Amino acid sequence: MRCWPRNGLRLVTLALFMVLAACGSGQADWGNCPTEGCEGSLDPSVEYTASHLLEVHSPVEIGPWPTVLLAHGSGQNAISMRSLAEAITSEGFVVFNITAPTRAPYLKTVEHIACAVLFARRYTSQYGGSADNITLAGYSLGAAMGSVVGLGGDGLSGDCVVAEGSSEPDAFVGYEGPYDLALTTYEIDPAILESDEPDVWAEINPYVRIGGNADLTVRLVHGIDQDRSVYDVVPEVTRDFGAALASAGYDVEVVILDGATHGDAYRPSTEAFETMTSLLTSVAYGR
C-alpha cells in the first residue's frame, strides 16, 4: 500500500496530515524501536570536510535504520537543529546533523550539503544506518540549497573527505526554503548573479536542477502565520516549487500549516516540529 500517489501534487492541510504517521509505520523491513521511542547516542564532532564538522545521532538498538541528513538555515549550525535530530533519532533513524557555511552566494552551502550526503552514504552503516535509504531534510536556506543537492548533487561536493559515491538522496523534505531566490529577502540579487556569474547561479538555483534524480521523493512544508518577519518565505515559493516538481513527474506533496512560523520547524512541541518528524518517518518507512 502506498500512502501517497506518485507523480502528482497534493496540498495537505494539518487536519489531514496526521494520517502520514500511520501510513509510514510497518511498511518496510527496518529495525523497530520500543513503543516509548529509541534511546539514542551522540557522536558530536565528526569531520566531513576539511573545515567543518557534523554530529551523528543513532539509536543504541541494532538496525539497520533509515538515514536522515539535517541541513540548518542561514547563520545557524548543528546545535540549532539538535532537538529535531534527537526527536528523529527516537523514531528509529541515524541522523547526520551538519554545520555548513551559509554566506552568499551559497555555493559553499550546496557543496557542504552534497558532501554530507556522500559522507553519510559511506559511513552510516558504522552507526547502524542504511546507505540505501537516505533522506535529506532542510530548513530555510538549508532546504533551498538542499533541494539543489536532492535534484542533482553529484559532482558538487567540494573539499569532501569522501571522494567517491553518489551525493543524491532518496528523498527530500524541506521546510520554508527560498527555492526561488528572486521572491525572498536573502542577501543576493538573483538578476545580477545570473548575469555576472551564470555558473554559480546555475549551481544554487533549484529550478535549473529539475529533471535530475527523477526517483526523488519530495515533501515540502510551509507555515502560514499572520505575524511575518523579514526572514519569512512567502507560501507561493513553496507552492510554485511543488507545482514545478509535479509537472516534471516527481512524487511530491506540499503540506500547509496554518499558524506555523518560520522558526517552528526546529522548536519542540510546535506543529511544524511534529510535522517534520512525522513526514520523515512516513517517507523513510513507507518506501
Image (tube, grey):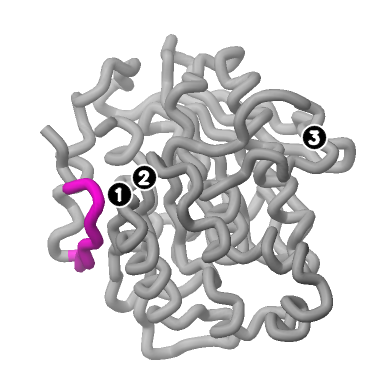
Query: Which kind of residue does numbered mark 1 sit on?
Result: Asp
Location of residue 224 with respect to 282 vertically, above or below: below
Q: Which of the 4 image quarters holds residue 116? A: top right
- Rendered residue at 43%/51% (across/down): 173
Q: From the image, tell me which residue sits under label 2.
A: 217
- Rendered residue at 48%/32% (across/down): 134
Q: From the image, tell me which residue sits under label 1.
A: 251
User: Mark 1–mark 2 contact, CB under 8 Å?
Assistant: yes
In x, y percent, where is residue 90? Answer: 41, 32
In x, y percent, where is residue 108? Answer: 78, 55
Span colored in magenta: 5-14
Q: Which of the 4 image quarters holds residue 55? A: top right
Q: Secondary structure at mark 3?
A: loop
In x, y percent, where is residue 276? Answer: 38, 52
Query: Which kind of residue does numbered mark 2 sit on?
Result: Thr
Query: Which kind of residue does numbered mark 3 sit on?
Result: Cys
User: Mark 2–mark 3 contact, CB under 8 Å?
Assistant: no
